[in-house]
Image (spheres, helix red, strand yellow):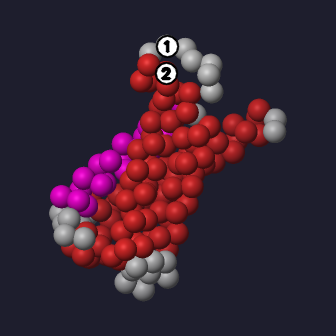
Amino acid sequence: MATKLKNVLYWMLRLLAALIMLQTLFFKFTAAPESVYIFSSLGMEPWGRIGTGVLELAASLLLLIPRTTALGAVLGLGLMSGALFFHLTRLGIEVQQDGGLLFLYALLVWISCLVLALVYRVQLLHLFFKEKSTAL
């Protein structure tokens, strides 16, 4: 695949994940009834809602900065793994008649972050080992 096409694809994945996470911040930070319902159902209201929002904001910003994309992807992957886990175990795929939209958003972010974490995995080596690695 041509380098330019790869860059466009990776930026699309970054934007998709970041925009979905950023879009949900309004609901988390304004204590929207849907968000309060979800975190109350999990026994994590309000600290879980606010904490998750702060971490999603950080993940979104890290994804959009080229030098920290891998870190944002790993953070987003962890956050969305938690979201998917709770959808599959306690909340259900459909929450308050949303047609499974929140589950779908979490899945799209999870897939985007997984691809980005794999593509930018060398960044993680540089971050943690502070040396130029060409092993991967």
Residue plotted at (55% across, 48% down) = 114
The residue labelled by disc 2 is 126
Mark 1 or mark 2, earlier in chain? 2
Image side of residue 49 versus residue 58, left or right: left
Image side of residue 68 versus residue 89, left or right: right
Alpha-carbon neighbours of circle 2 within 10 Å: few (<14), some, or many (≥20)? few
Position of the N terminus by quadrant: top right
Image side of residue 16 versus residue 26, left or right: right
Residue 22 in view:
no
Gap between marks 1 and 2, in whole Å?
6 Å
Q: Secondary structure at mark 1?
A: loop
Question: To which quarter of the image does residue 133 belong?
Answer: top right
Residue plotted at (37% across, 84% down) = 96
Give the amino acid type for the residue marked by disc 2 in the picture.
His
Q: Secondary structure at mark 2?
A: helix
Residue plotted at (45% across, 36% down) = 71
Q: Position of residue 16 (x, y in %)?
A: 56, 53
Give the label on residue 131, or none.
Answer: 1
Q: Residue furthest right?
A: 2
> Magenta stretch mostly in which secondary structure?
helix
Q: Residue furthest front?
A: 135
Q: Position of residue 39 (x, y in %)?
A: 25, 69
Give the magenta range: 47-66
